[in-house]
Image (spheres, grey):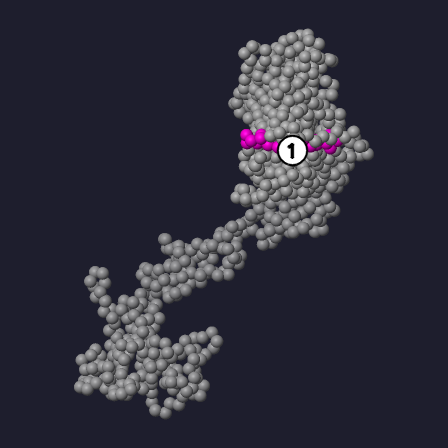
Amino acid sequence: MVDRMIETSNPKDTMTPTRPPNGARPRRHLSIAATLALAAGMLVLPAQAAFAAEPIDGAPTAGDTVFPNVGNSGYDALDYAVAIAWSPDTVQSDGLVSGTIESATTTMTANASQPLRSFTLDFEGMEVDSVTVNGEPANWVRDVDAAAIKYKLVVTPATPVSGEFTTTISYHGVPVTHIDADGSAEGWSRTSDGAILLGQPVGMMAGFPHNNTPADKATYTFTVDIPSQLSAANGTGLSDAAVVSNGELVSRTPSEDATRTTWIWRQNQQMASELAVIGIGRYDIIETQLALSDGRVIPSWSFMDSTLSAANKTTITNRVNQLETITRNLESVYGPYPGNSTGVIVDTVPAEINYALETQDRSFFPSVNSVNGNTLIHELVHQWYGDHVSPTTWTDIWIGEGMATWGPTHYNSAAGFGSGSSTEQTYFNSWNSVPATSVNWSIPPGAQTDSAALYGYQTYTRSAQFWEALKIAIGDEAFFGVVRQWQDRFGGTSVSGSELKALAEELSGRDLTAFWEDWILTPGKPDWPEKLTASLASDRSDAVGRGDRVEYTLSAENTGRIPLASSVVTVDVSSVLARAAIEEPLAEGLTLDGTTLSWAVPATATGASSTVAFAAVVDDAASGGTLEAQATVATLGGTCVSCGTSLEVTEYELSPAPKPTVSGPARAGETLTAQAAGWPEGTTFAYQWSVGGKPVDGATAQTFAVPETAVGSPVTVTVTGTKAGYLPTKATSDPTAPVAPAPKPGPFRDVTPSTKFSKEINWMAEAGLATGIRKTDANGAVYFDYEPKTAVTREAVAAFLFRLEAPRGYTAPKVSPFADVRPGDKFYREIAWMHEAGLARGIKQPAGKPDYAPKATITREAMAAFMYRKDARGGFVAPKSSPFADVRPGDRFYREIAWMYDSGLSTGIKQASGKPAYAPKANMSREAMAAFLYRAEH
């Protein structure tokens, strides 16, 4: 029959059944999917949203598909303080001691990320006396369905809780044994002289109320009050009693009359509840210390049944003395020992407890034989795998159990700390000995849901085979990196199998999806991984040159336990293809895709090797660098030895390497510039100038200031082109004409022989038309500039033309012809002459005399008008087609501008489209005016 019980209590009236607020019926549990969604949504809410949210009922499940009704959501347990008082019954009826928990309290400190109207804990057996939340009485109800493995204590606090809160449950009664679906016993079990509490996978809920899921770790304090002495069930052998638990022994305090002793154990490390243990009985205690690899010294408390024989006690003591060596050896594989203490528990227990268990810090063993064999190493490995890093759900028990099975095999192998067979040989034989039709392969480790089969072949043997297969698949370095990083990254937490896959892929750089699916997620016998060692070699060791042929040989040696059938080796030939071409056709099994050459390794028996060759021919344009080829085993299970080749390519001179050219006048005082064009892209140049064929010291720039000493000799420049992968290459320019002497200094400091229109500007001074602009340098010396680019003012034009054309002795009129120029003004005489000579009519004004605007700059069209009036002879007819692109017939001063072109005074400004432009509205520069006047007079 289904054992289904609803027990309720009202803290204010223990005789009245409790109901939720508003008289509603007790809340039915949500479906698993709904509660998971609710819990997940609750966990991601920000703090400010959480306090504003409506209170909810915590979900009565942790979402574990193996135990859907065990574990709870809505809160995170932080710490448990468990206090019990246990006494043996006065009357004993058989060979095992019956006992009672006379009183007990469990205080859970937890954190709720969203306000909880109610929440649940797991608790099987005994009688609940009271429940308080944050010190206030709370309503509670027990909802039990034994067939569904459901033992819920539903708590409804007086007011909803949020953030950190405490719940204290008081209870008492006869402790119960939880029988698992596979028939094994856990929870409280009677022993020959006391009791023991074990809890894997879910029996710890028979010990005390809590959140019974490995996903919710916490710290613990166990305070256990027992008689100071105990006897066997038949009343014989009265002797000192003890309590053993997890963590560190804080105290053992006798009562005033010394008849009872209170033992306090504190577990400061994070611990899943299924790893807790409380042992009550007559024990011999072995207290010692262990020195760990990192220098820590931790206490060791070991407890062994005091009724064991002397020989058995000696065996156990010897094993305890080996703990330091074994632990330090395991630290070299898994990292620092995670606990703060260690030890073992060896107790005589009923046959239903036919297993050892990795209770945290000090594992439990039901016999001397179990602690004396590999089981001790198994349980010690569990201190890292299963205890320090725990599964989030019971489906992923395979991670820890598989490693704890593989670990002793590695420990005892020659590669570990013994001389036994390799783990590869051991687990291949194990895999190979079970036919594919065996039922052992029917349950995939990472998809199991049946609690009755939880401790089957798939959890231990197949999972240990998986760890070895993973080592073969990703190689020793990545494998042991995963083994260690699993602890370094996730120690003290609970982690899923998918995170193990992600870590293995990260550290190995391999895609393990298909491998994981085959070994962990899919029913059926998985494939044992192929294993090979690849190598790559070439037939050349010296430098290769253009046209040389290089032959490469790929080899694959089968170093595994099964024939090679699907392995692939790839070669990165990007460097080779940059300087050479792969010969076609390729050998069978080879394919080239871009810069990757792939080799499908042919069927190869164990211990045998296969080879294939390919060749490359160095390009005719290759120079320098290296031909590098790098082989990699693309499929799982491969390692590469001597898989990279590198051959130097002979360096050649750059080509083409044309002669450089030299620009600039070959004249002393001038600057010459070297230009190197047409060389390969990326070439850099160094320069050396020579005069008369002799290099000039220090003349190594792109430009060369021609010295006076070079007069009469030609100048050349030699460029040296350099580029990575090529030899330095030289080329020398044609010689210049013999260097001419530097011209004598001109009248103007800012006009040099290289200045545009320098000849015309210097003529202006020689002809007396321009004296320049007087200036004084920093030393007070007077000099003159011409300022070629400066715009010409109208008064300056008058001065220039007057000096060029006016008759000697010209006397300016006493009355100015222009309204804005008065007698006595600067250039008055010259401006008056412009009017009298008919060169300037002035600018009309609304009334009276015209203006001359002497300070205004003159435009190019106005200059054309002045020049036309000065020099044009009658009869010029402007052409119907303008010589300039920006001046049209009919435009103002069109005739005068056309005459400028016709008379050779202006060639215009070159345009890319054809006809030159004149820019009639632009200001006239002083250099352009010099050119116009020079051309007019020559």
In the picture, measured across the screen, residue 267 lies left or right of residue 806, that is right
Magenta span main SS = strand
Q: Please tell me which residue is depicted at 23% across the width and 63% down the height of the picture.
A: 777
Residue 210 appearing in the image: no
In terms of image quadrants, where is residue 852? bottom left
Residue 913 appearing in the image: yes
Q: Is residue 149 magenta?
A: yes
Q: Please tell me which residue is depicted at 65% across the width and 35% down the height of the picture.
A: 19
Q: Depth check: give the residue in front, 695 or 814.
A: 814
x%, y% of residue 513?
A: 69, 41
Of the 4 image quadrants, the one containing the C terminus is bottom left
Of the 4 image quadrants, the one containing the N terminus is top right
Q: Depth check: give the residue in front, 761 or 144.
A: 144
Judge the density around disc 1: few (<14), some (14-19), many (≥20) Cα neighbours within 10 Å. many
Q: Is residue 764 magenta?
A: no
Q: Depth check: give the residue in front, 323 or 222.
A: 222
According to the image, label 1 marks what residue?
18
- In the displayed structure, 433 sits above or below 705; it is above
x%, y% of residue 893?
A: 37, 85
Q: Please tell me which residue is depicted at 39% across the width and 59% down the height of the picture.
A: 703
x%, y% of residue 5?
A: 72, 30
The part of the chain drawn in magenta is: 132-151
Q: Secondary structure at mark 1?
A: loop
Q: Identity of the amino acid at label 1?
A: Thr
